[in-house]
Image (spheres, rainbow, N blue to C red):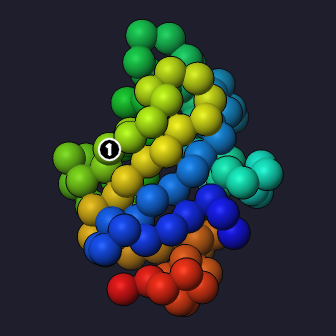
Amino acid sequence: MAWFSWQGDRLRLALRVQPRAPEDAFGPPYGDELRVRLKAPPVDGKANARLIAFLADAFSVPRRSVSIQRVARGRSKVVLIESPARFPDPLSEVRNGMVGAP
């Protein structure tokens, strides 16, 4: 699973974002990226803002703990999450130590 790795206590996710989806949700992997569906449109930074809010809620961290590290525009993004407090069901294998979870 090349779409996630650990950098100390930071979780690095390679994401493929699908804007204008019917609901905010994690989807199946898209090659080496995890698919994330967002209701927000890809205009005026709305999809990026929604992505940060969605991930912060999913991992029970403040929004300031989620940062887009690469490709702030476009569908492929790399995101860092500082010290995730919980892991949503679709990502439970990340926590279960598949790649050295803390």
Q: Secondary structure at mark 1?
A: strand
Residue indicated by mark 1:
67
84 lies above or below 50: below
Instruction: Give residue 101's quadrant in the image.
Output: bottom left
Residue 32, image x and y in percent? 72, 54
Query: In which quadrant is the C terminus drawn?
Result: bottom left
For the question of whether residue 27 can be seen, the reply is: no
The answer to whether 65 is drawn above or below residue 39 in the figure is below
Residue 65 sits above or below residue 76 on the image = below
Q: State which quarter of the image contains the N terminus.
A: bottom right
The type of residue carrying mark 1 is: Ser
Q: Position of residue 96 (x, y in %)?
A: 54, 89
Residue at the image position 41 percent from the left and 18 percent from the top: 45
Give the residue drawn at x 37%, y 68%: 7
- Mark yes or no: residue 30 visible: yes
Residue 90 on image: x %, y %: 63, 69
102 shown above or below 91: below
Residue closest to the eye, 26 or 67: 67
Image coordinates of residue 2 in percent, x first then y, are 66, 63
Label count reads 1
Q: Residue at x 43, y 48 (%)?
A: 79
User: In the figure, is residue 51 to the left or right of 83?
Assistant: right
* Residue reaching furthest to the top: 44
Position of 30 compared to 88: left or right?
Answer: right
Q: Nearer the viewer, residue 36 or 102?
A: 102
Q: Residues within 10 Å of mark 1 (few under 14, many from 20)?
A: some
Is residue 52 shown left or right of residue 98? left
